Image (cartoon, rainbow, N blue to C red):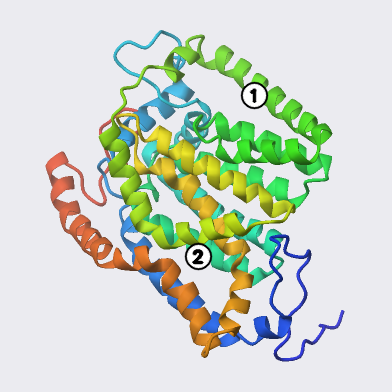
Amino acid sequence: MAKSKIKAGTVEPAAEPVSSGVSAPDPVLWGGYRASWIAVFAGLSLLLIVLVWGPLSRIGVHYSIGYNEGNAAYFSRQAVTGPPLYAVPPKFVYIDYPPLSYHLVGLAGKVAGNYVAAGRWISVFAYLAIGVLAGLIVRVLSGYARAGVYAALCWGIWLAAFDPTRIGFNDPHLLAVAFGMAGLYCYVRGPESTRWLAASAVLFAVGLFTKQSLIAFPGAVAIELFLTSRKRLGTWLGIAIGTCLVLLLLTLVVDGPHFFSYLFSPRTFAFGDFLNMFGLYAGMFQVVIAAALIWILRYSGAGRDRVLVWAAVLANVLGSVFVLGVGAGINHFIDAMLSILLILGSSVVLLAGFAAQTRWPRTTLAVLLGVVFFFGPIVNVPRRIMEAQSNESQRTERERQVGYSDSGGTHCPGRIWP
């Protein structure tokens, strides 16, 4: 088949009109910004490399990156070797998460002979998968591949600047986020299709049995279905509840009868922790939060992208509630960050129309996309570089203290540690 040729200064039309209620810019304007996009992608790719170098370089270290890694390693081994995770009521040790991630990491660790390394690499793959899924969601909603690539780069850079510990970290959170993003993609990909709705429901249920707090995106889909089609909502809810019941039955049979005792263990609340965590989140993303808020307030459509409104509201509210708990981290704002990211990516085409009204449209668009919306991450670059250098200098000393070397192994039974 011969390739279709497109004249310079034009672009293929979007697969579906943007439904935000604001007219998309003329295709000539979009095509005329090719140099701006090249500059933005080049600059953001370099920024991504600088920020992820530190987190990725420590994947092979022979000590715990965070206290959760030790718990996750032992629980993952326990899931595949026994005794059952929830066989006895909690007394001294609490398992905070559902069992699915422990079984997945446990199986991978048993095959690889290393539970921590398996969990860390699964986290890396989840990190990459989330970026791909964010790009696909934005591609579907906006109709433009460039907007999807931009969203994927946003995810990679924003997380590396905001919470780099999560990259290559043996913890269930990013894996659960990946399942949730897959569920959201299936919904926006085919909201009228029973097959895509079923896939969305199953993936959201799997995500909840990986980490139970990630309810913002399935909640947003439920609200949107309630407003658009009660029949499809019933189908979606029926499949989701059915999947959850099957997973719950398997959990009780395989992992023990005290699952709920662990899952709903009491937690102390501290308002100071909320102020600290929310301050870090709002300080990093103040510009894009303001941009997303403007988009939400001006929104007047009823298309597939309306689900992003509910997602942003729920994710920010729930994230703020969850960080009230002592021991919670800024990772509870990852869904909120993603909801803002999806809004920015899906409406990025509208920025071309805004840039066209300025004196230097190409420069304006490049500065907006590559500098203004990355103000927080760019400011954090020096600190992340110093942290990466510090981690590298401490690595040899810390491994020497615990008796490891780069080529050595471990005497821990079951090869929990590298």
Instruction: Return the residue nearer the eye: 1 or 50.
Output: 50
Q: Residues within 10 Å of mark 1 (few under 14, many from 20)?
A: some
Give, as a three-letter code, the residue at label 1: Cys
Give the image location of residue 220, x and y in percent: 63, 40
Residue 35 against residue 193 in the figure, above or below: below
**Residue found 40% across the figure and 58% down from its top:** 285
Would you say the residues marked 1 and 2 are in contact, meaning their CB atoms lie under 8 Å apart? no
Give, as a three-letter code, the residue at label 2: Leu
Give the image location of residue 355, x and y in percent: 56, 81
Left or right: residue 46 compared with residue 363: left
Circle on res. 153? 2
Q: Which picture quadrant has residue 389?
A: bottom left
**Residue found 66% across the figure and 47% down from its top:** 307
Instruction: Return the residue nearer the eye: 191 or 121.
Output: 191
Circle on res. 124? none
* Mark 1 residue element: helix
Q: Which picture quadrant has residue 224?
A: top right
* Mark 2 residue element: helix
Sequence-first disc among 1 and 2? 2
Q: Quadrant of the C terminus?
A: top left
Residue 331 against residue 393 in the figure, above or below: above
Residue 380, can we see it?
Answer: yes
Mark 1 to mark 2 CA distance (whole Å): 33 Å
Circle on res. 244? 1
Residue 417, can we see it?
Answer: no
**Residue found 81% across the figure and 38% down from its top:** 229
**Residue found 37% across the figure and 12% down from its top:** 90
Give the image location of residue 214, x and y in percent: 52, 36
Residue 162 against residue 53 in the figure, above or below: above
Left or right: residue 236 compared with residue 59: right
Q: Residues within 10 Å of mark 2 (few under 14, many from 20)?
A: many
